[in-house]
Image: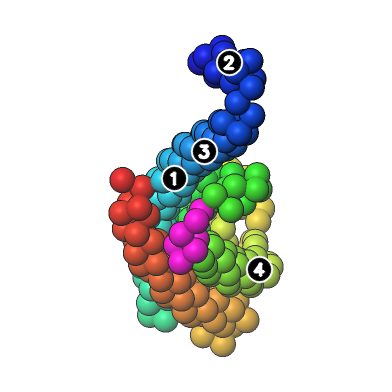
């Protein structure tokens, strides 16, 4: 093609047709410019297609993380419900006044043991830490994603603060020997018969005015309130995750 145009230019010069040569040269320049513009448009189209595909991929990855979160939140809420039931049972048994403190202490560890919800953040961390956030061109959806993770982080901070406060109060009971953990059947593999005989305990569970009785009662009441608050926050996170997941699935397909 280049040789063809070169031959035309040479013929025009040899025939001394300067006017036609100038017009031809201008036409050739216009043709080259048009060709460049077309090439740029095609390149831009390809880049836009590539960016659109990447954007959908990011939405799909975030959606996958959210779906894992939703399942883990369900598991965590089941665990909190079980903790709440153990706490209710311990508190009721405590207030009914027990001769055998094991009736109370058997539920003690279950009142603080649970499955903690830890969010899956691989996708959002990858997007925000590697400068890929600008690839999300849907500004409304991008703000929605960032809002979800900010809200979730704040909710989990509240849960952690409340739980740490609760655990701090529980383990501030002190006087573990007086409480009688060594007498609980589930701990007999740790404390043998001789140790149980050497370690003394009090019958605090029979006296509502005893310091340990009051501490147990107050901590379990706090535990119930904290558990209910945790369920409330987890439900809120789950509802928001489900709504965002639906939006992302629509945009990643």
- Ranked by sequence position, the earlier of labels 4 and 3 is 3
Tag 1 secondary structure: helix
The first of marks 4 and 2 along the sequence is 2
Q: From the viewer's perspective, is the residue at label 1 or at label 3 nearer?
A: 3
Q: Is mark 3 on a helix, strand or loop?
A: helix
Q: What residue do we see at 46% from left, 76% from top? A: 229
Tag 4–tag 3 contact (CB < 8 Å) = no
Q: Which residue is drawn at 41% across and 71% down?
A: 236
The residue indicated by pointer 3 is 34
For the question of whether residue 123 can be seen, the reply is: yes
Query: Marks 4 and 2, how far apart in space?
Result: 96 Å
Look at mark 2 in the image and give the residue it sits on.
Answer: 11
Secondary structure, mark 4, is: helix
Q: Which of marks 2 and 3 is nearer the N terminus?
A: 2
Q: Are marks 1 and 4 in contact (CB under 8 Å)?
A: no
**Which quadrant does the C terminus fall into?**
top left
Residue occupying the point 56% across, 31% down: 20
Residue 68 placed where, x, y %? 40, 48
Please tell me whether residue 126 is drawn above or below residue 89 in the rendered image: above
Inter-mark Cα distance, 2 to 1: 49 Å
Of the two numbered discs 2 and 3 in the rendering, the one whose residue sits closer to the viewer = 2
Q: Which residue is nearer to you in this view: 159 or 244?
A: 244
* Magenta part of the chain: 136-142
Q: How far across and down, in percent of the image, does residue 164 sit?
A: 63, 66
* Residue at 66% over, 53% down: 198
Q: Where is residue 238 in the image (x, y as percent from the top left)?
A: 38, 63
Q: Which of marks 4 and 3 is in front?
A: 3
């Amino acid at each position: 093609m280049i040789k063809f145009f070169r031959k035309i230019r040479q013929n025009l010069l040899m025939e001394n047709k300067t006017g036609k040569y100038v017009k031809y040269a201008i036409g050739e320049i216009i043709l080259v410019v048009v060709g460049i513009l077309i090439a740029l448009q095609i390149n831009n189209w390809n880049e836009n297609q590539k960016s659109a595909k990447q954007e959908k991929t990011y939405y799909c990855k975030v959606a996958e993380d959210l779906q894992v979160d939703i399942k883990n939140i369900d598991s965590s809420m089941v665990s909190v419900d079980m903790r709440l039931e153990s706490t209710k049972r311990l508190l009721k048994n405590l207030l009914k006044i027990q001769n055998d403190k094991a009736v109370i202490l058997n539920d003690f560890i279950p009142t603080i043991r649970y499955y903690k919800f830890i969010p899956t953040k691989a996708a959002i961390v990858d997007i925000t830490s590697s400068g890929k956030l600008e690839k999300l061109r849907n500004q409304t959806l991008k703000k929605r994603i960032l809002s979800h993770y900010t809200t979730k982080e704040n909710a989990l901070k509240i849960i952690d603060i409340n739980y740490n406060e609760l655990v701090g109060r529980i383990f501030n009971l002190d006087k573990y020997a007086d409480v009688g953990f060594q007498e609980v059947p589930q701990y007999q593999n740790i404390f043998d018969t001789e140790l149980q005989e050497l370690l003394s305990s009090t019958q605090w569970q029979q006296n509502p005015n005893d310091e340990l009785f009051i501490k147990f009662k107050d901590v379990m009441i706090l535990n119930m309130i904290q558990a209910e608050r945790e369920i409330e926050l987890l439900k809120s996170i789950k509802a928001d995750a489900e709504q965002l997941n639906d939006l992302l699935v629509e945009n990643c397909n």
